[in-house]
Image (cartoon, helix red, strand yellow):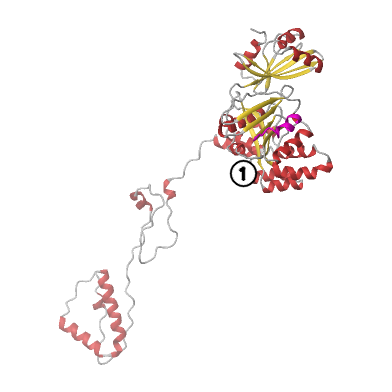
Amino acid sequence: MAKIDFFLKASIERRASDLHFSSGEPPRLRIDGELEIIDENSIDNEVISEMLFELISEDEKEKLLSQRNLDKSISVPGIGNFRLNILFTRKGISAVLRTIPVKIPTLEDLGLPPVIIDLCNLDKGLVLITGPTGSGKSTTLAAMVNQINTQNKSHILTIEDPVEFIHTSKKSLVNQREIGGSCKSFADALKNALREDPDVILIGEMRDLETIALALTAAETGHLVFGTLHTRGAGSSVDRIIDSFPANQQAMIRTMLAESLKAVVSQTLLKKASGSGRVAAYEIMVVNTAISNLIREGKTFQIPSAIQVGRKSGMITMDQSMVELVGRQEVKPEEVTPLMENPNLIDSVIRNMAKGSKPPAKPLPKVAQAQFPSTPIPSSGVSEPKPTAPSIPVETLQKIVVAPPKITTVPPKIPMAPKVPSAPKPNVAEVSFPKSMPPLTISKVSLQDSFKSLMEDDSNDDLLSDMEIITDENKKTG
């Protein structure tokens, strides 16, 4: 077993992203974004050289000694895959080995938003994956290529330096080219790519003007192009591409980019609140008519506002993504605050989290939930108001509700009949029949004679009408 295998196994077991060797220094692992010493003993230049030379060929050794730098991918049987970079410092030889997962992750494994799947189904255009070094750009690209390879019947051509994730052809045909091995440079590979009938072209890094220009040309000529940039945010990515060209060509490049650019996905990795592992925060810009016009007119400073408006299309700013991660308690506020353009956005989330930790307020008594009309109860057609809280028993409500006043029918005041000599004045009290008086003993004959006398005199019409009213009211009241 090679001497370096001990450190490579430790890197895999501890889920480190990188393994560092430096002459005169102890070896270190980058775990969850931070470097940790795994062996207190320092390693000198000769020991590091001996371990590294076991991983490269004689030709690569000559190239390293002549160029003082080497970048390649290696596969160590029984351990895993790594991207190796060897360099020389003033102390001697040093190296960084980045761990590459053997299994290519899916979009679901990475927790990428659904809009990323839509980008994989595009027919043509340019899609940029941006972010600082070590932000997971290569992993995201590998997942997107794997999605196309699984779902579509296409020819996928990748140009990488070096090749990291190894793709096996599924529904698609996948050809991977490595800079320095199968091609001289990104520009050289892109020039020939247009003659190789690709449907999808992946550019590992858009480093220089020639590579960027060829990528735009490929996107304009009907190919789906994925590329990476070391920029943060959609607006700065657009400016980076345009500023790469001479001033007299920038107006034309703005027009080309406005037509060919389809999306920019910017990402960064944050330490989880649990202290183990990292989670990605994203800024996603999907180019629509409004954003295309902003690019064409050189108003890239307005792009963040356009992204905020486009939430329904799957767009999101980096600040919004970080706020959501804090709201879900996946990361701590102090982790994202230094990275946010507007740290004040996190204050409301912190206040809401603090409120959520308090016990809930006591509910109001159920009695107060019953609402009753404040207007007086009418004198007719009275019906008890229905309480709004159906859970309160009727007996309880009957105790609460004040009973409406007792309605009594008061007979109207009977006007005095005019004095008529021919007819005696009737005794009104004898006709009202109050309940408290004993029943009158009036003969049927005398009562009929009295009514007959009243009927014969027209001046007593008002009195008869009043008599009828009193009779009707007495029937109602009993």
In this view, the residue in front, 127 or 41, is 127
Q: Position of residue 118 (x, y in %)?
A: 59, 39
**Horizontal side of residue 451 vs 310, given as left or right:** left
Q: The N terminus is located in which quarter?
A: top right
Q: Which residues are magenta?
A: 187-199
Q: Position of residue 410 (x, y in %)?
A: 33, 71
Q: Which residue is mark 1?
A: 311
Q: Position of residue 402 (x, y in %)?
A: 38, 56
User: Mark 1, residues whose alpha carbon is within 10 Å: few (<14), some, or many (≥20)?
Assistant: few
In this view, the residue in front, 395 or 40, is 40
Residue in the image at 76% along x and 44% along y: 254
Q: Position of residue 248 (x, y in %)?
A: 84, 43
One can see residue 408 in this view: yes
In this view, the residue in front, 130 or 376, is 130
Q: Residue 433: which quarter of the image? A: bottom left
83 w.r.t. 250: above or below: above
**Three-letter code, disc 1:** Arg
Q: Which residue is farthest bottom?
A: 422
**Horizontal side of residue 247 vs 182, given as left or right:** right
Residue in the image at 75% along x and 10% along y: 49
Q: Residue 375: which quarter of the image? A: bottom left
One can see residue 332 in this view: no
**Horizontal side of residue 326 vs 211, given as left or right:** left
In this view, the residue in front, 185 or 416, is 185
Q: SS for tag 1?
A: helix
Tell whether position 53 is magenta: no
Q: The C terminus is located in which quarter?
A: bottom left
Residue in the image at 19% along x and 75% along y: 440
Tell whether position 190 is magenta: yes
Q: Residue 77: which quarter of the image? A: top right
Q: How many marks?
A: 1
90 w.r.t. 273: above or below: above
